[in-house]
Amino acid sequence: MYTWAVELIERGLAYVCHQRPEEVRGRDPPPSPWRNRPKHESIKLFQDMKHGKFDEGEATLRLKLTLEEGKVDPVAYRIKYVSHHRTGDAWCIYPTYDYTHCLCDSIEHITHSLCTKEFQS
């Protein structure tokens, strides 16, 4: 998952964002001011996220999608300082459901995915 996230940054399809959740709430939020930052900068910042150089909520990795009215780029990775039951404290960045769901389906060769509505925004 992490390697694919780095590849998305290298392809210009993801970026590190510093917007707070309250800045993107509400009707028709503005695009992130960091949306078009240079790829090399996002790669460096994503590595900094991985190495614990940011506090929780201070940075996220966002997927660069087509912005339609009222939509924001979805978060792919966020910082969470909690001990994982398998990896312990080896990681402090974790992928979101929105990012991992489609990747896992692809890995497992799932062609049709039925989901409930609790993840709709």
Image (cartoon, rainbow, N blue to C red):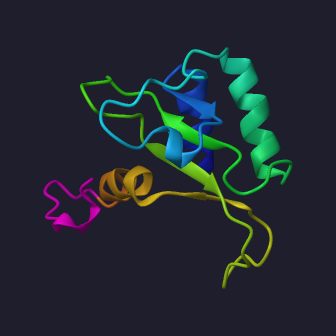
The residue nearer to you, when weighing 35 against 104, is 35
Residue plotted at (35% across, 58% down): 101
Residue 120 counted in the magenta span: yes
Number of numbered markers: 0
| Residue located at (77% from left, 50% from top) | 50
Left or right position of 45 against 77: right
Residue at 48 percent across and 57 percent down: it is 96
Against 97, residue 4 (above or below) is: above
Residue 16, by quadrant, is top right
Q: Quadrant of residue 41?
A: top right
Location of residue 13 in the rendering, given as x and y in whole percent from the top left corner: 48, 25
Q: Quadrant of residue 93?
A: bottom right
Left or right relative to 25: residue 93: right
Instruction: Pinpoint residue 95: horizontal percent, then vertical percent.
Output: 54, 56
The secondary structure that dominates the magenta segment is: loop
Residue at x 51%, y 46% (from the top left corner): 22
Frontmost residue, 10 versus 74: 74
Q: Is residue 72 above or below residue 83?
A: above
Residue 22 lies left or right of residue 121; in this view the side is: right
Q: Is residue 36 magenta?
A: no
Report the magenta residues as a range: 109-121
Q: Is residue 7 above or below residue 75?
A: above
Q: Where residue 87 appears, x then y in whole percent?
A: 72, 76
Residue 36 in percent (x, y) is at 57, 15
